[in-house]
Image (cartoon, rainbow, N blue to C red):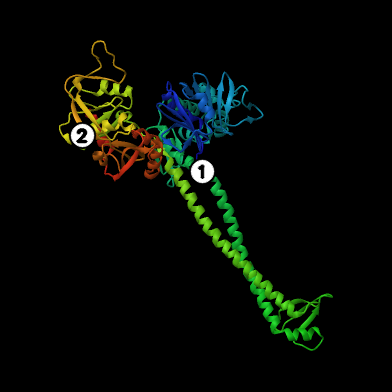
Amino acid sequence: MKTVLTALDLLASSVEMSRLVGAHVENVYRTAAGFLFKFGQGFVTITRHRVSLTGLIPEKTHEGAETLRGLFRGERLTWVGLPRFDRIVEFHFETGTLVVELLEPFNVVAVREGRVVWLLHSYRGKDRELKAGAPYTYPPAVFVDVLRAGVEEVAKAIDPSDVRRSLIRRVGTGPEFADELIARAGVDPHALAAALKKIVDDVAAGRLEPSVCIRGGAAVTVLPIVPVAAKCDEVRRFDSFWVALDFYFGPLELEAAKASATRELEQRRRRLEASIQELERKIPEYRGEAARLKALAHRLLVYKYEVEQALAGSESSIRVVYVDGTRVKIILPEGDEVEIRRDVQLGRQISALFEKAKELEEKAAKAQAVLDKMRGELAKLVEEQRKAEEKVKSSVKAVVEREWFEKYHWTVTTGKRPVLGGRDASQNESIVRKYLKDHYLFFHADIPGASVVIAPPIEDPLEVHQVAQFAAAYSRAWKIGIHAIDVYYARGEQVSKQPPAGQYLARGSFMVYGKREYVRNVRLELAVGCRRDGEAARVVAAPPKSAPLLAEKYVVVTPGNVEKSRLAKELAEKWGGCNVDEIVAALPGPSRVSEVGKGSPLSWEEIREIFKSW
């Protein structure tokens, strides 16, 4: 089973990552498997398994990524690719380079002006040394660089007497790609070189056929080409290579995350299991020895008189064999041999045997109590480990492909009409300029500092009230604790950025000319919920009446004293799946929960259709 990308895989991945060129690094995180770079247009995952775009966001933290974040946050990506046909990928930024080596040992290196300024692992080998402050040098080039070499040069590197070995050792294909080439082109060096160059050139040009080979129900390899040599029960095709990599490596990285999150629990579990096994072995030994000693004491008690007669030299049914001056061996009538002391009264020896048996029985009982307690602790530990692993699993979020309207506050009314609202002054300007048509409606809470909310023409007064509620919620009224406010609305043709002569309009502000309609005493209430669309989880907000159309689970909130971050964390844990930061962004301000609800939401396709009508 493939556990790390080959040079061909990494070439395909770098081609897809090239779409991020020109984007800025927004943040850098540490994950259990490696690092996660957030760009404006997507995420890049860096682990010992792969370097690629990803749509799977595991549990992440800033701890351990502070230096990388300090070096690259805000930096614009200028180039990403392979410096040669090897398992090395570089990200070039305006002020430095990030080098990822998917070699042994796996390493991530930050380079500025040719020198290492940070690295994951210091390394010293016979051919090079990597350490902070030293010049960065590549590993020795032992392969023909097929990215730059022609067919003839590649063909010369292939030994006709050992084709597979020379493809692996001299050309750097790795075993998997070598087998693919032989299956496609045979063993002629020139044919192999031509096939190799054709595949590499196609991959470099972005002509990919992302595939995962399934065998015995399990994924065994992933390739940017359709496998020919691999024995597959099924070849699953994907539209993008990074999606195939998520499908293939996601479970491996999840297992690594589980192992990291439960390492201490696993160690405690193993120690406890070892102690339990030891007690399970000891207890039968204690009980067996106690039973043997008790039985022996009983037999000696039965034959006590005869034994004493035999020891005194009188005729008896007991045979005596002298061992030394203090010990003798006696043979009981049943044939049992017992060694006793001559210098200690037999009665005392029998009592000592009973006492020893009793001690062992008590020892076995105490050990059994400890064993029962340990088994209970183990059961709790196993459950704790299961919950920890489940938490890790549920923390992995699929990146949602955002629709155009999702960058704004958005919702739908009970009449399935789309509604848009600005998140800030810049977005207020944007939605009026791009989406407010003359006959559409413009809503605004009657207070400075509020979201501009727009909607298509609405006749139903109940729906008008819902849009007004949405506008009231995303206004300064919520933050200052007002529980009701007036909201006005007007037609789009009445809204203008042109102020009266001699006046100035701040960014995000507008003039409304002509008559305004008012919705009086609008109660500040908002439903915030979570919905699942396949693997994707989305946070949604809506007027309470239309919340069941958007969310499976939701709460109705009103202005209160619970901080957004605290409430968002509580809701995220309760709902499972929805992102805390997205819940924070949906909450208008400090809140309290007034109601809990469940809905039967519209499909995401239906919602997309609703907004297509804009």
User: Percent x, y for residue 137?
Assistant: 60, 23
Q: Which of marks 2 and 1 is in front?
A: 2
Locate the C terminus and report the quarter of the image it occupies.
Answer: top left
Depth order, front residue of 318/64 = 64
**How many other residues sit within 10 Å of disc 1, few (<14), some (14-19) or many (≥20)?**
some
Residue at 52% of width from left, 24% of height from top?
71
* Direction right: furthest residue: 325
The reply to whether residue 291 is visible in this rendering is yes
Number of marks present in the image shown: 2
Three-letter amino acid code at disc 2?
A: His
* Direction left: furthest residue: 459
The reply to whether residue 87 is visible in this rendering is no
Rendering quarter of residue 40: top left
Three-letter amino acid code at disc 1?
A: Ala
Among the two numbered marks 2 and 1 on one chain, the one whose residue lies closer to the N terminus: 1
Vertical comparison of 371 with 60: above or below: below
* Direction top: furthest residue: 502
User: Percent x, y for residue 84?
Assistant: 53, 24
User: Percent x, y for residue 507?
Assistant: 32, 19
Q: What element carries label 1?
A: helix
User: Percent x, y for residue 572?
Assistant: 39, 41
Depth order, front residue of 318/164 = 318
Residue 465's tag is 2
Q: Is mark 2 on a helix, strand or loop?
A: helix
Q: Mark 1 points at which residue?
A: 261
Q: Distance between the residues labelled 2 and 1?
A: 48 Å
